[in-house]
Amino acid sequence: MRRFTGGIVLVNPSDSDDGGIDLGGAYLDPTTGSTFTKLDMKAKTGAILLKVMSGPFNDHVSRFNTAAVCFAAVQSAAEGKTVTPEGL
């Protein structure tokens, strides 16, 4: 688990599922729109979640776009592709 100002990144590289990870606050999955305070992670998966914060709608749109780019980079890397800023 790695925390950032606007979100959190989680990876479960193990061969077994990891259930009930307490996130220590509310986080949004930008790919589904779901909000979590705990997360169950399947084996060999990762997640990029955005911190749920009160504020103007534009802040959330900006965070969503940033998370979408990060998700694309993680997905490309997982597929063994070389990731460059120009490729996103």
Image (tube, rainbow, N blue to C red):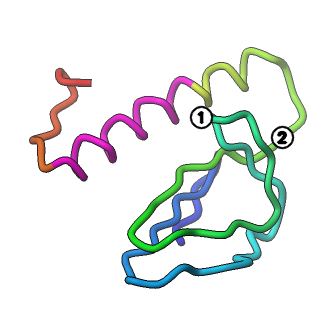
| CA gap, disc 2 and disc 1 | 17 Å
Whichever of callouts 2 and 1 sits on the residue coming sooner in the sequence is 1
Tell me the amino acid under the disc marked 2: Met
Kindly identify which residue carries mark 1: 31
Which quadrant of the structure image shows residue 3? bottom right
Q: Which mark is residue 9?
A: none
Residues packed near mark 2 inside 10 Å, few (<14), some (14 to 19) or many (20 plus): few
Which quadrant of the structure image shows residue 17? bottom right
Bounds of the magenta span?
65-79
Which marked residue is nearer to the observer: mark 2 or mark 1?
1
Q: Is residue 14 left or right of residue 1?
A: left
Which is nearer the eye, 80 or 7? Answer: 80
The residue at 18%/21% (across/down) is 86
Residues packed near mark 1 inside 10 Å, few (<14), some (14 to 19) or many (20 plus): few
**As displayed, is residue 48 above or below residue 3?**
above
Kindly identify which residue carries mark 2: 53
The residue at 67%/69% (across/down) is 40
Tell me the quadrant of the picture where the N terminus can be found. Answer: bottom right
Q: Is residue 75 magenta?
A: yes
Q: Is residue 25 left or right of residue 76?
A: right
The residue at 41%/30% (across/down) is 69
Where residue 46 appears, as percent x and y from the top left, is: 46, 60
Where residue 6 appears, as percent x and y from the top left, is: 64, 45
**As displayed, is residue 69 above or below residue 81?**
above
Give the farthest residue toward the right: 54
Where residue 67 appears, as percent x and y from the top left, is: 52, 35
Tell me the quadrant of the picture where the C terminus can be found. Answer: top left
Which is nearer the eye, 52 or 12? Answer: 12
Which is nearer the eye, 54 or 71? Answer: 71
Q: Main secondary structure of the magenta part?
A: helix
The residue at 50%/30% (across/down) is 66
Q: Is residue 63 magenta?
A: no
